């Protein structure tokens, strides 16, 4: 089952899931999901392949904002933004808002340098992007066991907020991988499922995500796996997961 997941960073919960007929149809699935969700002043992030004008338009229609990465699917616009950053640095014509993060984990060091500029008429490719206000550059440097790698990723956004806030939104985009997809695979064993007939695949996917949300809402501090095991052994714990904890 190829599906699209809407994840809430602030609540740590899956808000919605929509089935998609492969990656080529993700755009339409996302548009449907945005229509379903009751959005207001939300900040929406997407993967690069879903950075599309029609999705940006839909987000603005729903009185919300977007932060979208530009990669090879918008190569001309991406290169234009990179040239614009070089131009501003060279000419020192505009003050660049900057923010830096450094994360150390065992033998790996990740450094991220965020830079933000307001949108400019100099960028011809920016035309047609509803509500676009900011350009963000993320320069990432990783050192792992003596090996060094670098990459630059560019984002567009309808927000005009400090660079530090953009760092939070960009970093938060990957929460769904660690807090939802990884848990579904490792704890719920979704990838090992042998159910494949009829609507069974989609129905079980919905049940797993409901189970994940219910377990995460339970106030116990132990792990997701421990909560689910306890629910299997204890009628009381199972009732608390399903119906909530009463004070």
Image: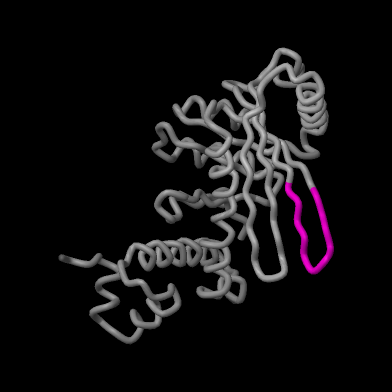
Q: Residue at x 53, y 68 (%)?
A: 184
Q: Residue at x 77, y 26 (%)?
A: 89
- Give percent across and percent down for residue 135: 66, 28
Q: Residue 181 lies in what quarter of the image? A: bottom right
Q: Is residue 68 left or right of residue 221?
A: right
Visible in this render: residue 240?
yes
Image coords of residue 242 (percent x, y): 29, 68
Q: What is the magenta range?
A: 140-150
Q: Residue 126: x and y, percent?
A: 70, 21
Say which residue appears at 49% left-offset and 37% top-offset: 43
**Residue 18 falls inside the magenta stretch:** no
Quadrant of the snapshot with the C terminus: bottom left
Residue 157 or residue 91, whichever sits in front: 91
Residue at (57%, 66%) from the top-left corner?
A: 182
In the image, taking residue 12 as reference, residue 200 lies left or right, namely right
- Magenta segment's dominant SS is strand
Farthest top residue in view: 121
Q: Is residue 232 above or below residue 121?
A: below
- Magenta region includes residue 147: yes
Report the residue that reaches farthest toward the left.
Answer: 247
């Amino acid at each position: 089952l190829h599906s699209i997941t809407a994840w809430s960073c602030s609540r740590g919960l899956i808000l919605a899931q929509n089935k998609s007929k492969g990656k080529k149809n993700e755009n339409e699935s996302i548009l449907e999901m945005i229509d379903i969700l009751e959005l207001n002043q939300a900040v929406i992030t997407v993967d690069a392949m879903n950075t599309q004008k029609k999705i940006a338009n839909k987000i603005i229609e729903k009185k919300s904002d977007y932060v979208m990465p530009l990669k090879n699917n918008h190569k001309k616009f991406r290169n234009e933004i990179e040239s614009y950053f070089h131009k501003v640095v060279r000419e020192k014509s505009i003050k660049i808002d900057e923010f830096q993060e450094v994360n150390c984990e065992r033998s790996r060091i990740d450094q991220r340098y965020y830079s933000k500029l307001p949108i400019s008429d100099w960028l011809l490719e920016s035309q047609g992007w509803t509500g676009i206000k900011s350009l963000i550059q993320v320069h990432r440097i990783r050192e792992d066991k003596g090996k060094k790698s670098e990459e630059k990723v560019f984002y567009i956004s309808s927000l005009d907020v400090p660079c530090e806030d953009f760092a939070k939104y960009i970093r938060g985009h990957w929460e769904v991988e660690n807090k939802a997809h990884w848990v579904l695979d490792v704890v719920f064993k979704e990838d090992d499922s042998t159910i494949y007939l009829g609507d069974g695949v989609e129905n079980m996917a919905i049940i797993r995500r409901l189970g994940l949300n219910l377990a995460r809402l339970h106030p116990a501090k132990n792990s997701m796996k421990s909560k689910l095991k306890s629910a299997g052994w204890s009628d009381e714990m199972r009732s608390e997961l399903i119906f909530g904890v009463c004070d």
